[in-house]
Amino acid sequence: FELISKEYLSVMKTILSKKDDIIFFAFGPGDQSLAINYFTRNGLQDRAIISGTSDPHVFGWALDVFCEQWPRWSGQSSLEVMAKGIPVVSFMYEEFSLFIEPYLSLRDSELVMTSHQGYVDMVIRLLEDKEYYKIKQNSAKEIPKKVTNLDERAKDVGRQILLALEQKLETQVNTTDTDLDR
């Protein structure tokens, strides 16, 4: 949570205020108190889930949009959710553009905002405009392929989850059959 700023939280609060049917997830190591206290103070504690370190391979499936924090971007987590087709909205201070320029190829340039209002508007557009969302889902899937095969990793994790569920179901069925035999 050392990467999450009050500025970022304020933008998330604006999005939550404009869209009353969404939930904000924040995951990461470190002190969560800034985020927890911020959303509690603003009456949004029921719509903000704050948790420790997570596995983006698993939690990425629960997201519609990945709201990347700033000034430092998320790195591998962003690529992992993009491999699942989750659009990543990023913010860039124009004065930092020289530092961020090398990383721009790892983002959808249409989703890199240079104003807070642009960030809010883009997140809301992705949530409301299903046709645009579908376009951005497809472009998101292409970006990680430039640097790694996260798409295949995401499919592997999905297969592992299905296998674990099948094994659990099989165990329950066998237990039920054994109970019926008695």
Image (tube, grey):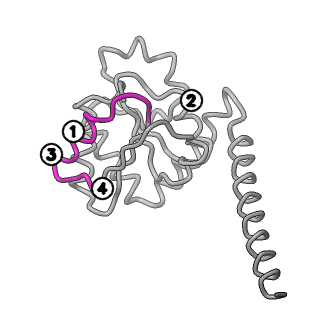
Local packing at callout 1 (Cα closer than 10 Å; few below 14, some 14-19, many 20+) is some
Q: Which mark is residue 10?
A: 1
Tell me the mark number nearer the camera, choosing from 4 and 1: 4
Q: Residue furthest top?
A: 98
Q: Circle 3 sits on which residue?
A: 41
Sooner in the amino-acid sequence: mark 3 or mark 2: 3
57 sits to left or right of 17: right
Question: What is the spatial separation of the Cα atoms under label 4 and label 2, in whole angstroms?
Answer: 26 Å
Q: Is residue 95 above or below residue 87?
A: above
Which residue, given by chain and number where applicable, does mark 4 sit on? 47
Which residue is disc 2 drawn over? 76
Question: From the viewer's perspective, is the residue at label 3 or at label 2 nearer?
Answer: 3
Measure how far apart labels 2 and 1 are at the Cα level. 24 Å
Tell me where residue 174 appears, x and y as whole percent: 81, 75
The residue at the point 61 percent across, 43 percent down is 57
Q: CA distance from mark 4 to mark 1?
A: 14 Å
Which label's residue is closer to the chain start, 4 or 2? 4
Quadrant assignment for the N terminus: top left
Above or below, 129 against 116 in this view is: below
Q: Specify the amino acid type for callout 1.
A: Ser
Residue situated in front as seen by the camera: 116 or 73: 73
Q: Position of residue 129 (x, y in %)?
A: 40, 59
**Counting residues from the N terminus, which is met first, the one under dot 3 or under dot 1?**
1
